[in-house]
Image (cartoon, grey):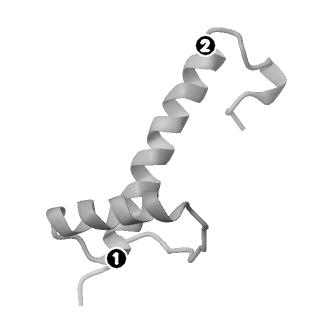
C-alpha cells in the first residue's frame, strides 16, 4: 500500500451570514465541488489572501517586530 502524504485534518465549525453561505453553495454547484472541498478551498484561499495582507503590513512596518510571524 502506498504511503499517504495527506496532512492530518482538523474539524471546525463556523457561523457565517446565510446570504454568503447561499452564494458559496451556488459557486459549489457551478464548480462541481462536494461540501468538504468547498470549505477546504475557502479556508485555504482565504487564509492565503489574509497572510498576504499581514506580510505586506509587516514589511511596511505597520506590525511591531515583537508580533512578527517568525518563530
Residue 41 placement (x, y as % from top left): 36, 58
The answer to which quarter of the image holds residue 37 is bottom left
Residue in the picture at 43% in, 64% down? 21
Write down the residue under mark 1: 35
Say which element carries label 2: helix
- View extreme (right): residue: 66
Residue in the picture at 39% in, 47% down? 45
Residue 9 placement (x, y as % from top left): 50, 74
Q: Is residue 8 above or below residue 57?
A: below
- View extreme (top): residue: 60
Q: Is residue 27 above or below residue 70?
A: below
Residue in the picture at 71% in, 14% down? 62
Which numbered disc flags the more N-terminal residue, 2 or 1?
1
Write down the residue under mark 2: 59
Left or right of 62, for residue 28: left
Count neighbours of disc 2 (C-alpha within 10 A) and say few if under 14, some if 14 to 19, many if 20 or more. few
Say which element carries label 1: helix
Residue in the picture at 68% in, 33% down? 69
Left or right of 34, for residue 44: right
Q: Nearer the viewer, mark 2 or mark 1?
A: 1
Amino acid at each position: 500500500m502506498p504511503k499517504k502524504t495527506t496532512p492530518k485534518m482538523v474539524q471546525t465549525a463556523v457561523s457565517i451570514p446565510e446570504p454568503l453561505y447561499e452564494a458559496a453553495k451556488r459557486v459549489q454547484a457551478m464548480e462541481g465541488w462536494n461540501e468538504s472541498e468547498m470549505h477546504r478551498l475557502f479556508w485555504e484561499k482565504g487564509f492565503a489572501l489574509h497572510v498576504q495582507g499581514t506580510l505586506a503590513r509587516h514589511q511596511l512596518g505597520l506590525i511591531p517586530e515583537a508580533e512578527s510571524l517568525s518563530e
